[in-house]
Image: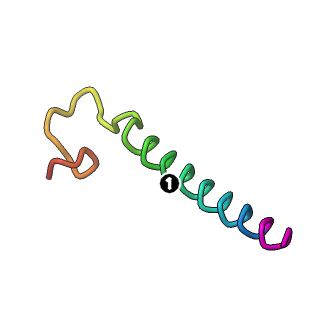
């Protein structure tokens, strides 16, 4: 019985860890500094408005 409980905890920890990693990737992508030079006024493929 305790082996089943440990296995369930491992699965839950894996799912929570993957969710935190995915959320971290999304937040890091959305709040990354923009790759624009000071002379550029138009939009390129990195800004997402093409």
On the image, the x and y values in percent for residue 19 come to 53, 54
16 vs 8, left or right, is left
Q: What residue is at 28 percent from the left and 48 percent from the top? A: 46
- Seen from the viewer's position, the closer of residues 8 and 29 is 8
Task: Look at the image and name its color scheme.
Answer: rainbow
On the image, the x and y values in percent for residue 27 come to 44, 41
Q: What residue is at 20 percent from the left and 47 percent from the top? A: 44
Place residue 10 in its image quadrant: bottom right
Single out the residue that lies furthest toward the right: 2
On the image, the x and y values in percent for residue 33 come to 39, 33
Q: Which residue is mark 1?
A: 22
48 vs 22, left or right, is left
Q: What residue is at 15 percent from the left and 32 percent from the top? A: 41
Considering the numbered disc 1 on the image, is that residue within a helix, a strand or a loop? Answer: helix
Is 30 included in the stretch rendered in magenta?
no
42 vs 4, left or right, is left
**Quadrant (top left/top right/bottom left/bottom right) for the N terminus:** bottom right
Crowding at dot 1, Cα within 10 Å, few <14 / some 14-19 / many 20+, comes out as: few
What is the chief secondary structure element of the magenta stretch?
helix
On the image, the x and y values in percent for residue 3 come to 85, 72
Q: What residue is at 34 percent from the left and 36 percent from the top? A: 34
- Seen from the viewer's position, the closer of residues 9 and 18 is 9
> What segment carries the magenta color?
1-6
């Amino acid at each position: 019985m305790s082996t089943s409980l440990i296995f369930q905890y491992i699965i839950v920890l894996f799912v929570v860890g993957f969710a935190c990693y995915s959320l971290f990737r999304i937040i890091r992508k959305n709040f990354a500094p923009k790759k624009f030079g000071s002379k550029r006024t138009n939009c390129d493929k990195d800004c997402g408005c093409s």
